[in-house]
Image: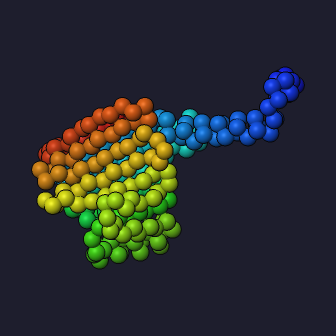
Amino acid sequence: MKDQIKKVLQLSGFPEWIFLVTMSSLLTMALLRAFFVHAELIVAWAGDGSLPAVCYHASPDFGLSHYLVLCPGSGSSASQLLFALDKKGCSELACIVSSTAAPSPRGARILLNKKKVAELIFLAETRPRLFWQNLASEAKYAGVGLRICAITSPNAPVDYYPWKIDSKRGKNGEMFWSFYLQNESMKIKLAWLKTGELQLQWRNHQGNRGEQYFPRSNRGGIWEKTL
């Protein structure tokens, strides 16, 4: 087979090293894309009307699954999310993204205490209160990578390669988060509305769009969507 490839290259006058570099690049891109091919969203909420927890799960054809917590939610919602993650066999979270302006900050602490976490990102949209300072200290003590990103403008996204993260607050106390893969069509948007609803919008790798609302409820639940 190798000799046949050499003959084709010699006949075409195409340098062998260029061919090898091109094929290697294409293979690398295919492997990186495969890491995010089989993806899903997990939303968990408690029955107390608090902020739901949202997680992105990429299940590749090779290697380990990748769990990115887009919103840890309230303490009770985080506990519901843990139940869903345990059923999937999740032993480690790649990252937790948490906003200092979130109405209930305890979800991040519960996840940190119950799961091994590689990195914690604080979106510092308000001056960090004592709770956040203590949580940052606990994360460092546990060996969790910590990044505190000051949100000075909605047009200044945070880099968490290969993701870009936008975060902003509305005039009525609403909160908005956007997560999108660089150079990909994948995008996920969260909105915590003044009505108490969580609005979830997404666009997958194929460019297909979807939307789901999670209103206040007196019953807990878990919702999963394959992207």
Tell me if residue 181 comes above or below residue 4 in the rendering: below
In the rendered view, tell whether residue 141 sits above or below residue 225: below
Residue extending furthest toward the front? 13
Q: Quadrant of residue 102?
A: bottom left
Q: Is residue 2 visible?
A: no
Q: Position of residue 122 (x, y in %)?
A: 37, 65
Q: Residue at x 64, y 36 (%)?
A: 26
Residue 164 rendering spot, x and y as whole percentages: 42, 53
Colour scheme of the rendered structure: rainbow
Compare residues 34 and 26 and report the one nearer the observer: 26
- In the drawing, does residue 25 fall left or right of residue 172? right
How many marks the image carries: the answer is: 0
Residue at image position (46%, 67%) is 146
Is the C terminus in the top left, top right, bottom left or bottom right quadrant? top left
Q: Is residue 105 left or right of residue 55?
A: left
Q: Residue at x 48, y 44 (%)?
A: 183
Residue 221 appears in the picture as rendered: yes
Q: Which residue is more in the foreground, 21 or 69?
A: 21
Q: Residue 150 appears in which quarter of the rendering?
A: bottom left
Pick the front one: 90 or 22:
22
Residue name at image x 21 percent, y 47 percent: 198
Of 73 and 86, which appears nearest the observer? 73
Q: Is residue 220 left or right of residue 135?
A: left
**Relative to 107, residue 6 above or below:** above
Q: Is residue 9 above or below residue 159?
A: above
Q: Residue 44, position in %: x, y?
A: 28, 45
Q: Quadrant of the N terminus?
A: top right
